[in-house]
Amino acid sequence: MDNRAIGVFDSGLGGLTAVRRLQEIMPQERIIYFGDTGRVPYGTRGRDIIIKYARQDVAFLRQFDLKAIIVACNTVSSVALDLLGEENDIPIIGTVEPACRRALRETKNGRIGVIGTVATVRSGAYERRLTAERSPLALTVCACPLFVPLVENGRVSRGDIVIETVVREYLTPLREAGVDTLILGCTHYPLLADVIGDFMQGVTLIDSGAEAANAARTQVEQGAGPGGTQYFVSDDPQGFTQLAGLFLQQPAAGEAELVEISRY
Amino acid sequence: MDNRAIGVFDSGLGGLTAVRRLQEIMPQERIIYFGDTGRVPYGTRGRDIIIKYARQDVAFLRQFDLKAIIVACNTVSSVALDLLGEENDIPIIGTVEPACRRALRETKNGRIGVIGTVATVRSGAYERRLTAERSPLALTVCACPLFVPLVENGRVSRGDIVIETVVREYLTPLREAGVDTLILGCTHYPLLADVIGDFMQGVTLIDSGAEAANAARTQVEQGAGPGGTQYFVSDDPQGFTQLAGLFLQQPAAGEAELVEISRY
């Protein structure tokens, strides 16, 4: 038994897709979530700024007595996970390794696709991890920079010509490469599962945030309960509830508190 | 003669549309530009964070010996201009008042449209200014939250179904209202002038950044030259050159220097 909480953070609210999974599979855990809504998005930014922001996010969470931190942000997981692991004495669980492990279990033809932000793709983290585990593999990796703003504007539905056009444009190379497994390498992308699934018929979609939550279950000693989640954001706690519902697929239990993150 | 420089800032690089105009009409001026690329965008954020960021942007620029600051960001101009004006002993020139003045000169039928970010629209700054100058007016104000990410991803061309669909969606209420004048209340939007112009046939488009530059010419004592522009950003100076060319419509003369803006 370990009754300490699990910290979870993301550049914004996409990481709530990981929280949702955590709440399902480890309902007895206390979760502290921080979403850096005052500086979102990270995926368009340079490496040094991403590292700086990630360290501040961890420093904020470390004020609580935690048994692990889930980096529910593929951009940070791709760019700064090793560094955060070295700097902290509790497990820092990212999205990349669990998502890769799952993709390697799922693929039949050894053709795996990865989609993510510009920073995630530029980092090469997914290719490094996948090819370190198994080689040869046929990998196709594509940045999808418009997916985050489209999701945040609710453009996630079948029949919306805007999202369908962008999905077709970004994912055509993946379809042409014949991938049978596609890693959704950004915690916003599960909200596009319908539209992506329609275009990538028969392809297994890997939800990287959910896989990070699954990894936590195997790596972290269980709590005794009762579970519960506290939410913190760096901008506009009033706006939190509406957008959070989108990612949690149910109303967030409780309000979010405001954090001045640049102080950390 | 006043040889001090003019400071210009924006949440990102959209404010370079104002710099371009300044360089045309006041070629003898020294310009110091700061783009807060490490925290862009502002237009989706809450009021308190926008004010905090704007004060830091001004504090950075005030390190230089300036004769005026142009707030080449409609979000900051809408939310924080009065405050910044009170806190500084040099003219702080925003986009809202000059754009409104121009729109009132241009309109024949008294029906004016305004488009901007969510924060700009929520502030009500354009309505307040326009109706203070003339009443009655028929105003139609619409937030266009996807325009900034679409512009930053280069989706600005005629024939691009994504931008054409979003333009039609956002601007239909303005066309139905019969506006004859449309204020582009965000310094990113002039890059969409072709697509917006096609949809809003016969409507006069007002470039708020250019109008702010025009206002500076009347309010600021001239420099003796030689002119020149120094660029500062809070993220990724390497990435600056490419995106800057989009807004300046010519290569930026010179590199950008990195600023750690959260220190100010």
Image (tube, coloured by chain):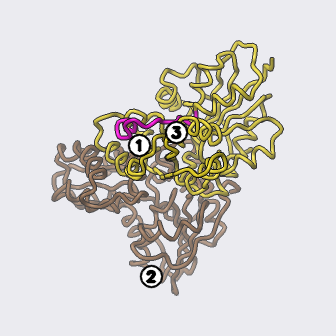
Chain colours: A brown, B yellow
Q: In terms of depth relative to the viewer, which is nearer, B206 or B9?
A: B206
Q: Secondary structure at mark 1?
A: helix
Q: Which mark is residue B150?
A: 1
* Magenta stretch bounds: B196-209
> Label 1 lies in what chain?
B
A225 or A256, nearer to the observer: A256
Residue assigned mark 3: B107
- What's the residue at 62%, 42% (across, down)? B96
Q: Label 3 vs label 2: CA separation?
A: 61 Å
Q: Quadrant of the C terminus of chain B?
A: top right
Q: Mark 3 and mark 2, same subunit?
A: no
Q: Quick check: B174 above or below A260?
A: above
In the rendered image, the quadrant that contains the N terminus of chain B is: top right
- Residue A136 visible (yes or no): no
Could you say whether the residue bearing mark 3 is in a helix, strand or loop?
Answer: loop
Kindly report the distance in space between the C-alpha atoms of the residues bearing marks 1 and 3: 29 Å
Residue placed under numbered mark 2 in the picture: A27
The answer to whether A150 appears left or right of A112 in the picture is right
Tell me the quarter of the picture where residue A254 sits. bottom right
The amino acid type of the residue labelled 1 equals: Leu
